[in-house]
Image (spheres, helix red, strand yellow):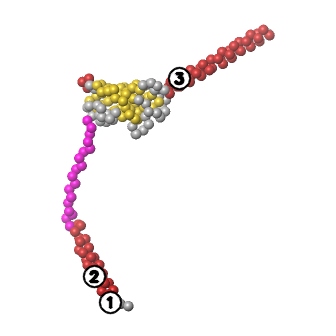
Amino acid sequence: MTGIRKVLAAVFAGLALTLSAAAPAAAQAAQAARAAQADKLKLTVAGDGAQGVTIQASYADGRRLEQVVRLVLTATGPDGQRVGPVQLEPQPEGQGFYSSGPVLSTGTWKVTVNSPAPLQSKATATVQARAAQSPPAPKPVAVTEPADGGGADWWPFAAAGLVLVAAAMGVAMLFGRRRTD
């Protein structure tokens, strides 16, 4: 039995050494996979409702993008029209928010946005560009005077009040002169 115990002890020792040697390699592989995932961007491309494109950039794992990345837009439109490459600038609307401004003409466009290394990513979307809409002109408002004369009734009262104030001041001035000490 002593021999079997020695063999089992040797097998368990070899197994423990193998696992302890493989654990750091597995940990490094998992860490590399997490780092690779953290270094990828998720780009959401959409039209802005007029002739531009908006892009929301975040990390692939859902975290907010806290650094400025260089995004480049290219687009192919109706009749083979091409736009780009256009470098996009971050907008103040939020972290990771980019906008192209009015770069597309009216029609359906295939838009591609690229991000170079180290945060390499690419996204493509179909965007419908429309002519910019202006708000409707306000309807004119007709100004009509009420049938009963509405606002004209206050003038006689204001005139009577002014006459009474003037009379009171005149009486005060007359009595103020007669007194002499």
The image quadrant of residue 10 is top right
Front residue of 127 and 118: 118
Decide whether residue 137 is among the magenta residues: yes
User: Where is residue 38 drawn, in percent x and y?
Assistant: 50, 27
Image quadrant occupied by the N terminus = top right
User: Where is residue 129 drawn, in percent x and y?
Assistant: 29, 32
Give the residue at mark 2: 167
Q: Amino acid at mark 2?
A: Ala
User: Where is residue 58 drawn, in percent x and y?
Assistant: 45, 32
Residue in view at x 40 percent, y 35 percent? 90
Give me the disc on residue 33: 3
Q: Under tag 2, what secondary structure? A: helix
Q: Mark 2 or mark 3, which has the lower sequence index? A: 3
Query: Magenta stretch?
Result: 131-149
Q: Under tag 3, what secondary structure? A: helix
Relative to residue 124, is residue 25 drawn left or right? right
What crowding class fits label 1: few (fewer than 14 Cα within 10 Å), some (14-19), or many (20 or more)? few
Give the residue at mark 1: 178
Residue in view at x 47 percent, y 34 percent? 66
The image quadrant of residue 114 is top left
